[in-house]
Image (cartoon, rainbow, N blue to C red):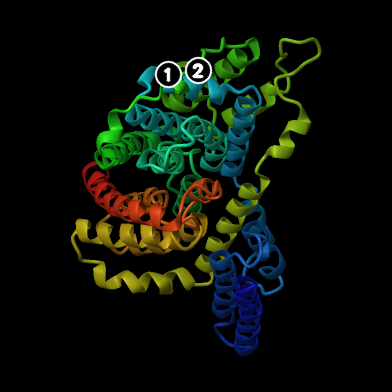
């Protein structure tokens, strides 16, 4: 009840502050600036405390921006119809097909079978399987897919006292989903949002392969460090074997093979777009390939008569809210940019303009990692990236040097259930306590700061 009252207070308090700012700014020479502050402040506050669903908050620019004169209709259509929304849409539809035909289970179980049945190797298998899937499927969907498998393993060791293995196995699903999402442009919503923001404002294009060259090795390094950390803390448990989790290998079905082949074709077209364009002369885009792959799923036949790999009713499971959230983040950033708010906010970092790159990156990455523990990583990126991109123009560093580390760091919130959707999903199992996640996550947050900063210094300088 207290939580409900707090949310109600924030709900009405935010609206009251919003109305007061609009009233005081009326007829002011800087009315647009203050109107943008009012709408942006309301959105960030509601995102932070989730007084209404974050996807509903993402629609606020539709209601307020045009009447207040802080955005043009063309700005809204560009934000909510951005090309990266279609890249995500195509990726989501492909992931639906993988899930529908249990391709993810085949991959995950294959990895677990390969690594072995000792407790440490089972954790390694879950980290690798979850990370690999999350590179291509949204981290939220991956966590939802993998959690039942982890719970099934734990059910086979029930009756024994709660061990570090139980804690780390669950955390391997949460952390593996977030870390794997760092690897590719479609792996996590903030990645796509950052690419869209800097392309829209500064004309800098980040294609699928360009992101993967940085994100994939960083993701693998962080996964390795997380496993090493778990391995060291497991003590004698690490060598205990759980032969009962070794399940009989299931054969691949016709539909699974067809979906996997199509998925791999899409990945190849994403990864080798530049050489393929040069070789064939055919120009295509990452989002075009994603949508083509999605469309083909509705055409390609399944094994049974009159069966397709996907039917339209399957799309009821599509996370449409994420697409709206992306559009809301783009609209918010545009609103703050054209009304001068970004310029003002970037002055906060002016004192660091002449600082060495390692100090600047350390400050930004710490803010990103610990900031996203208490607010949506999409909200953080939608506000923070435009500010830092504007600040970068006044320094000797490139926009990508400063903005990409922030975005990668936004996937490294390991402490709290509210930090990332995978954390919340795993915590909802009821098998973890907050202090168990927080103790482990705090150390890994510090590891994340160190690794992201060092990696960025080496590969983005």
Res 43 visible: yes
The residue closer to the viewer here, 454 or 432, is 432
Q: Is residue 383 above or below residue 199?
A: below
- Whether residue 69 sits left or right of residue 393 in the image: it is right
Residue for badge 2: 247
Q: Residue furthest left?
A: 356
Q: Residue 164: where, in percent of width, then height?
A: 36, 42
Q: Residue 140: where, in percent of width, then height?
A: 55, 43
**Quarter of the image where one finds residue 335:** bottom right
Element type where label 2 sits in the image:
loop
Tell me if mark 1 has few (under 14), some (14-19) or many (20+) residues whose alpha carbon lies within 10 angstroms of its own: some
**Quarter of the image where one finds residue 367:** bottom left
Q: Residue 145: where, in percent of width, then height?
A: 56, 34
> Are the residues at dot 1 and dot 2 in contact (C-beta closer than 8 Å)?
yes
Residue for badge 1: 113
Name the front one of labels 1 and 2: 2
Please tell me which residue is depicted at 68% across the width and 70% down the height of the picture. Answer: 64
Q: Is residue 337 above or below residue 183?
A: below
Element type where label 1 sits in the image:
helix
Tell me if mark 2 has few (under 14), some (14-19) or many (20+) residues whose alpha carbon lies within 10 angstroms of its own: few
Res 201 visible: no
The residue closer to the viewer here, 446 or 15, is 446
Q: How many numbered marks are there?
A: 2
Q: Residue 360: where, in percent of width, then height?
A: 25, 61
Q: Residue furthest front?
A: 159
Quadrant in which the N terminus appears: bottom right
Please tell me which residue is depicted at 20% across the width and 64% down the height of the picture. Answer: 355
- Give the Cα distance between marks 1 and 2: 8 Å
Q: Is residue 26 above or below residue 79?
A: below
The residue closer to the viewer here, 257 or 396, is 257
């Amino acid at each position: 009840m207290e939580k409900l009252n707090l949310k109600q207070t924030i709900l009405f308090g935010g609206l009251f502050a919003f109305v007061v700012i609009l009233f005081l700014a009326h007829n002011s020479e800087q009315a647009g600036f203050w109107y943008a502050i009012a709408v942006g402040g309301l959105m960030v506050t509601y995102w932070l405390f989730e007084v209404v669903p974050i996807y509903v908050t993402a629609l606020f620019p539709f209601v307020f921006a045009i009447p207040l004169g802080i955005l043009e209709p063309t700005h809204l259509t560009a934000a909510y119809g951005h090309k990266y929304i279609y890249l995500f849409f195509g990726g989501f539809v492909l992931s639906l097909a993988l899930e529908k035909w249990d391709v993810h289970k085949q991959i995950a179980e294959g990895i677990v079978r390969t690594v072995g049945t000792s407790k440490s190797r089972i954790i390694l298998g879950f980290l690798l399987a979850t990370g690999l899937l999350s590179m291509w499927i949204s981290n939220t969907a991956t966590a939802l897919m993998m959690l039942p498998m982890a719970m099934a393993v734990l059910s086979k060791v029930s009756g024994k006292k709660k061990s570090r293995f139980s804690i780390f196995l669950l955390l391997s699903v949460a952390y593996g989903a977030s870390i794997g999402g760092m690897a590719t442009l479609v792996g996590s919503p903030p990645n796509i949002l950052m690419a869209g923001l800097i392309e829209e404002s500064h004309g800098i294009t980040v294609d699928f392969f360009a992101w993967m060259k940085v994100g994939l090795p960083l993701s693998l390094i962080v996964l390795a460090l997380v496993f090493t950390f778990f391995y060291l803390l497991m003590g004698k448990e690490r060598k205990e074997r759980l032969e009962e989790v070794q399940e009989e290998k299931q054969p691949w079905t016709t539909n699974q093979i067809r979906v996997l082949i199509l998925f791999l074709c899409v990945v190849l077209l994403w990864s080798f777009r530049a050489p393929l364009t040069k070789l064939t002369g055919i120009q295509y885009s990452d989002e075009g390939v994603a949508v083509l792959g999605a469309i083909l799923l509705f055409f390609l036949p399944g094994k049974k008569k009159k069966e397709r790999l996907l039917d339209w009713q399957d799309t009821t499971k599509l996370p449409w809210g994420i697409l709206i959230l992306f559009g809301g983040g783009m609209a918010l950033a545009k609103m703050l940019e054209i009304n001068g708010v970004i310029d003002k906010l970037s002055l906060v970092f002016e004192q660091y303009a002449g600082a060495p790159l390692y100090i600047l990156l350390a400050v930004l990455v710490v803010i990103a990692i610990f900031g996203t523990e208490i607010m949506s990583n999409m909200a953080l990126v939608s506000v923070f990236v435009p500010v830092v991109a504007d600040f970068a123009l006044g320094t000797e560093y490139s926009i990508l040097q400063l903005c990409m580390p922030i975005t990668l760091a936004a996937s490294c919130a390991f402490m709290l259930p509210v930090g990332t959707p995978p954390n919340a999903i795993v915590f909802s199992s009821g098998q973890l306590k907050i202090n168990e996640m927080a103790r482990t996550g705090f150390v890994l947050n510090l590891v994340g700061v160190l690794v992201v900063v060092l990696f960025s210094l080496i590969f983005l300088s």
